[in-house]
Image (cartoon, grey):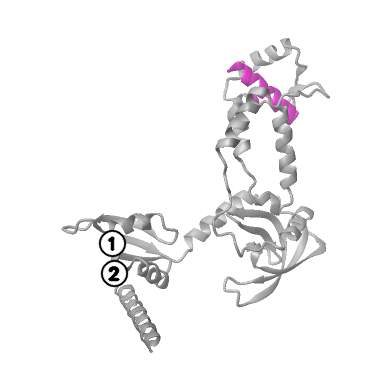
Amino acid sequence: MRGDRLLSILLCLQSHGKMTTSELAARLEVSERTIHRDMEALSTAGIPVYAERGSSGGWALMEGYRTNLTGLHAGEMMSLLLAHPSAVLSELGLHKEYDSALLKLLASLPKTLQDDAAFVRERIHIDGAGWNTAGISSSWLSLVQEAVWEAKQLIIHYSSSSHSEVTERVIEPLGLVVKGNAWYVAALTLEGTYRTYRISRIKHASKTEQSFERPADFILAAYWDASVQSFKTNLPRYEAVIQVHNAVLTRIEYARFATILHKEPLHDVPQWSTARVQFDTLESAASYLLGYGPDAVVVAPQELHDLVVRQAEAIVKAYRYAANDTKG
């Protein structure tokens, strides 16, 4: 609607200071001719908008003019209300600021949108935390955050994934990323390579007085996306063919540590299928399949079949030993 578009133009100019006709047309997905007509309408309505000529020109608002309107549509307002901060803002020390900002936003809304806001918050709640949140410590998050803001080098004592070795490293922290309930810091090493460190593995950290210059071409979101893709590409893969009851097959489809690559009905055996499944490793595949007992049988490879059989026999032996020990 034109009224919405006029308000969007006003808010764009208020936010950016000056914009060309082509920039506004591209942002609002209309023609440049439409933008010119909209500017005439704004001027007629008493909005102090004017055009500057020349190569560095564009449309602008008279200096000092600001609108009191938020420009929020009902859908936009609802999306902000549903962006619940969960534990993330609390860990960054910004939870009170979020509550204060939300309060100001609600107070600035017209009565109809305030009613819509109450309706949404009473009926939808988003909990951003996962179920397994215990045991993940971010005790050094605050210090790492300070180093990111101040562009100061950090000395960290960092443990390996197996926690068997702790090494001292000097890093230049460039940005923080939270995935699920785990915090990471993207950093540049003194050797000039980009690395990602999980903050819960930092055993000790100290901020130095040595400043560093942030690389001009470093974009945190792009770096993280590339890192995630590289991590997925380099994950260990172990494929197996199994015969499985369809009820179990449905459970495997939603499992985190197994991916069904292909499946087809098992001929002449109702309710059963043959599936090619991708696991992480031989050992994890055996442990996972043992949990389904007789409802999942390994067809190939032979080493997985033999490992599952050995582990199943060991389980039976352990239970028999425990039973005899109890009787004795």
310 and 151: which is toward the camera? 310
Say which element carries label 1.
strand
Asked whether 265 or 95 is in front, the reply is 95
The answer to whether residue 110 is above or below residue 249 is above
Predominant SS along the magenta part: helix
Q: Give the residues drawn in magenta, as a range.
A: 1-24
Question: Foreground residue, 123 or 277?
Answer: 123
> Nearer the viewer's eye, disc 2 or disc 1?
1
Disc 1 marks a residue whose amino acid type is: Val
Residue 274 in which image quadrant? bottom left
The residue beneath circle 2 is 300
- Earlier residue among tags 2 and 1: 1
* Residue 113 can be seen, yes or no: yes
Specify the farthest residue to the bottom. 328
Q: Residue at x 20, y 56 (%)?
A: 270
Q: With respect to residue 262, does 32 lie above or below?
A: above
Q: Which residue is mark 1?
A: 244
Percent x, y for residue 210?
A: 81, 62
